[in-house]
Image (cartoon, rainbow, N blue to C red):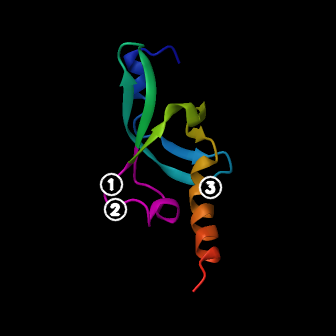
Amino acid sequence: MDGTPEELTTLVGREVYSNNGVFVGEVEDIRLDLDRQTVTGLALGRLNDELFGTRIDPGKGVLLPYRWVRAVGDVILVNDVIERLKHSDEEEESTVVA
């Protein structure tokens, strides 16, 4: 991607998946660094409730750092860091001592 406006706008509406094939969300907007003329993040909406349900209020989105993006095609693939959020919650719950 060379950063032309036409190519950037094609990212909006694309679905985002982790490396492991888990749906993360859908691109609603793009965060840019105008001085460097680079994409710095993807604003995601229509989030996967299983990953974000307890972390994000309904109707809200997340800003995903663009450095997490692994590949852009018909869908956008990102590092599995997102899935670790879910696993860290499960670990915290299992380590709670009453």
In percent of width and height, residue 89 lies at: 57, 66
Query: In this picture, which residue range is highlighted in magenta?
Result: 44-61
Specify whether residue 88 is painted magenta: no
Q: Label 2: how many residues lie within 10 Å, few (<14), some (14-19) or many (20+)? A: few
**What separation in Å lies between label 2 and label 3 (alpha carbons)?**
19 Å
Q: Identify the residue under disc 2.
A: 57
Question: Is the residue under label 3 in contact with that under label 2 (CB below 8 Å)?
Answer: no
Q: Identify the residue under disc 3.
A: 84
Q: Identify the residue under disc 1.
A: 60
In percent of width and height, residue 49 lies at: 46, 63
* Side (left or right) of 40 relative to 78: left
Q: Label 1: how many residues lie within 10 Å, few (<14), some (14-19) or many (20+)? A: few
Q: Label 3: how many residues lie within 10 Å, few (<14), some (14-19) or many (20+)? A: few
Which of 25 and 41 lies nearest the eye of the viewer?
A: 41
Question: Is the residue under label 1 in contact with that under label 2 (CB below 8 Å)?
Answer: yes
In percent of width and height, residue 74 lies at: 56, 36
Specify whether residue 51 is painted magenta: yes
Disc 3, SS: helix
Residue 15's place in the image compared with 22, above or below, is: above
Disc 2, SS: loop
Disc 1, SS: loop
Q: Earlier in the sequence, mark 1 or mark 3?
A: 1
